[in-house]
Amino acid sequence: MKINSHRILLSPAGQSGGGGFKVSFSESDFARLRSLLSGKMGLREKYLNSRREAVSEYITERCTELRMEPRRYIERLRLDVCDPELQGLLVRVLNGETSFFRNADQLQSMCDSIVSTDRDFPLSIWCAGCSTGQEPYSIAMMLRSDPRLADRPFSILATDVSGRSIQFAREGLYPALSLKRIGEDRHRRLFGIFTEKSGDKYRIKNEIRRFVTFMSHNLNNDPFGAFSVILCRNVFIYLEEASQRRIIDKFYQSLPPGGYLFLGYAESLVGLDARFIALAGSSPLHYRKPFPDMEMEVKRARVRQPGEAQPKKVPDKGADRRIELFARAEKLFEQKKYDGVMRLCQRILSEDGNSARARYLMGRVHAQRAAYGSALDEFRTSTALDELFADAHFWKGFIHFTVGDFVDAVKSFDNALLLESDLVMARFFKAMTLHAAGELARALQEFRVTHDAMKSHTGPLMKFDEGFPRKHYMDMTERYIADIKEAMNTEE
């Protein structure tokens, strides 16, 4: 059974096909759908109005096929990136047009900027709104071919709200037209070096694909990770100003001092956020998060009125004590003295009810005791208190996987990987989840990526490996890959 198969909308009689069923998509129906997309995904109402004809055509087709009134269809539409109905709608609503080496001068500016960054820190790049993958693959090709960066390790996370686009990008297979749309000869040569012919198409070589991880992600709602460089080109043109401000603030938190932000040609931070430094002379414009000692650093605190004294910080005298209590609780957990863990966590929560770490550790205790409902409640509370807590997202996914909630498990593992891309066990259990759900093609892809990640992992043990050596999981992964390939060949 496919992981999202239960979400396909059917008529009461379970039939599909239009027959004599007639659909009328009214102005009130469009207004209802527009409000839904704007509120949940941050899409600009003015842009949605411009796509009314395409939306009307799609909704009419789907409702005719499903023999369902548009109002009921809209009410049942689930707005998350895994929903197959939403994916079809997004294809019609959003303009996913892209190409290899598009606006290459900006990508070259990014490469030039990276050269000056601290080589002692990992280079992590986020392509937000990557569509069908041409942008992140272009970046990987440019970085691999730049002699100034030849020995510089890097990783690219490429995300898009459209699950269909992400699946296409993961395949890494592009039509011959892709080469014809590349303008400069040097970029055409790069494309030739890092692709291989596959029939009448071009396939991205593994030496490039291994640097890029693709993931479905909703900028308006999902958590963010930490990155050296963020590219979010031609995305804000679709979003309401409130969503733009919220996303920019998260970008600021995700970048280290000195990190770079690249927007599209028609996009700017003017009037939205004054904290970033616009780099003079750059064309197109891009931005940098300032270092604390830069004069242009703008404090996030509100502007004080003339003569108003700066508020004094009240020291938290109990912080050190809570840190010590948590360290004791972690030690007791390792010793499997779970009652003691719970008592210490309750003490921490009596002083600080918003302690995400205490909630997380209590969830771990409940999981050890197979009290999965209580464990899930604690992990949900922990991630609500701290949405950047990757460990809590991982364990929330593990509990969902254990009880058979495969859709939510995949989402949680994706969130954990978004926040901590080298959390290998999250990738392993995501592959296990997809396999258990019957998503064999996706599972095979994830197991292959997992195997590569395990091979490059340093040390015999991995985080959350429950004491089993890395070789144990690599052997399991190889067996799953072989079994899935055999099963898929049998199905064919």
Image (tube, rainbow, N blue to C red):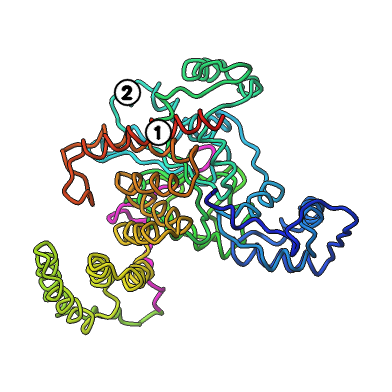
Q: What residue is at 71 percent from the left and 59 percent from the top?
A: 10
Between 111 and 310, the one nearer to me in the picture: 111
**From the viewer's perspective, is residue 479 above or below residue 350?**
above
Dot 1 or dot 2: first in sequence order is: 2
Location of residue 416 in the rendering, given as x and y in whole percent from the top left corner? 36, 54
Location of residue 391 in the rendering, given as x and y in whole percent from the top left corner? 29, 58
Main SS of the magenta part reads loop
Location of residue 216 in the rendering, given as x and y in whole percent from the top left corner? 51, 48
> Residue 448, located in which quarter of the rendered image?
top left
Q: Residue furthest right?
A: 20
What segment carries the magenta color?
282-304
**From the viewer's perspective, is residue 390 above or below residue 350?**
above
Residue that mark 2 sits on = 150
Q: What residue is at 51 percent from the left and 55 percent from the top?
A: 219
**Residue 50 visible, this angle:** no
Residue 424: which numbered mark, if any?
none
Relative horizontal placement of residue 100, taking residue 53 as reference (left or right): left
Say what secondary structure mark 2 lies in.
loop
Location of residue 266 in the rendering, given as x and y in whole percent from the top left corner? 62, 46
Q: What residue is at 36 percent from the left and 35 percent from the top?
A: 114
* Three-letter code, disc 2: Ala
> Residue 316, located in which quarter of the rendered image?
bottom left
Say what secondary structure mark 1 lies in.
helix
How far is mark 1 from mark 2, CA to CA? 37 Å
Residue 299 magenta-highlighted:
yes
**From the viewer's perspective, is residue 109 above or below residue 404?**
above
* Three-letter code, disc 1: Asp
Q: What residue is at 34 percent from the left and 57 percent from the top?
A: 398
